[in-house]
Amino acid sequence: MSRSHQDRVALVTGAAGGLGVPFALRLAREGCHIAITDRAPTDDLVAAIRATGRDVHFEPCDLADGEAVERLAAGVLARFGRCDILVNNAAYMPLLPLERIDRDAFRRFLAINLEAPLILARILGADMAGRGYGRIVQIASSTIGNPMPGFCSYIATKMGGVGLVRGLAAELGPKGITVNAISPGLTKTPSSEKELPAALFEAVVQRQLIKRTEVPEDLCGTLAFLTSEDAGFITGQNIFVDGGTVF
């Protein structure tokens, strides 16, 4: 258990599956109390976090709804009295060719991948600033440096997320808050296996220097570091954790 995480409060979005489950569990094991959100139920994750001895709060939220995102932030503060760590993990990433991208489809990418993180950072960042301490981590994507067909909207909004990190770092750095991004490669999760073809996973492995498919646990150490006191002089950065695809 990390001393710098002990009794911190962390909010992890997109916690029903994918990267959210191992992220929330890792922070709980480091000593954090955990707030989690998703549209889907998270009963198993709630039970697993409670088994670590940490407090846990689940609040359902559709991150495409800006007002619901504001209520989520307020609910976390009401439940715990503060938030020390924000992990903007939730992502909207269907494989969508350019000819199928209309305004409504693109706006959903924008709302979930970019607008919701901004709203949460604005509200929870103000709370962090009041104590002079905070950690915000944005989950970006190595596709911003290694683009592939079918991911146009996803790449655009993930690149926007890196820009958001840099802007927030400038705004919040003087207040004791660090803001960084982690860019995973294609990571095998239940949702990515369901939505993406097996051939894509193999094609990505061939581009990597480390010749195996990335799994969620490959990212947890980087997250634990960036949310710790040890990373207190690192901000505005985007760390590629992708097996050596982008460098």
Image (cartoon, grey):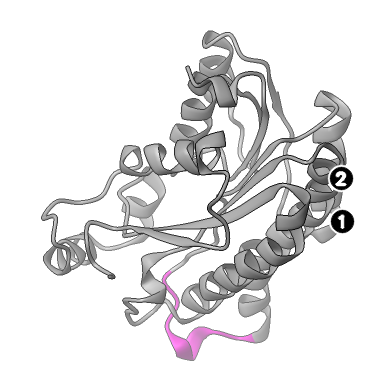
Q: Secondary structure at mark 2?
A: helix
The segment highlighted magenta reads 95-102
The image shows residue 150, relative to residue 140, as above or below, that is below
Name the image quarter holding residue 247: bottom left
Q: Are marks 2 and 1 in contact (CB under 8 Å)?
A: yes
The image shows residue 50, relative to residue 37, as above or below, that is above
Q: Could you tell me what secondary structure mostly forms the magenta stretch?
A: loop
Q: Which residue is mark 1?
A: 67
Residue 66 in picture, x, y percent from top left = 81, 60
The image shows residue 214, relative to residue 197, as above or below, that is above
Give the crowd class for mark 1: few <14, some 14-19, many >=20 residues within 10 Å. few
Amino acid carrying mark 1 in the image: Glu
Q: Secondary structure at mark 1?
A: helix
Residue 84 in picture, x, y percent from top left = 71, 36
Cα distance in 3D space between marks 2 and 1 = 6 Å
**Residue drawn at the location 31% of the way across and 76% of the way down:** 146
Residue 71 numbered mark, or none? 2
**Residue drawn at the location 26% of the way across and 49% of the way down:** 214
Residue 228 visible, this angle: no
Of 35 and 98, the residue lying toward us: 35
Amino acid carrying mark 2 in the image: Arg
Name the image quarter holding residue 34: top right
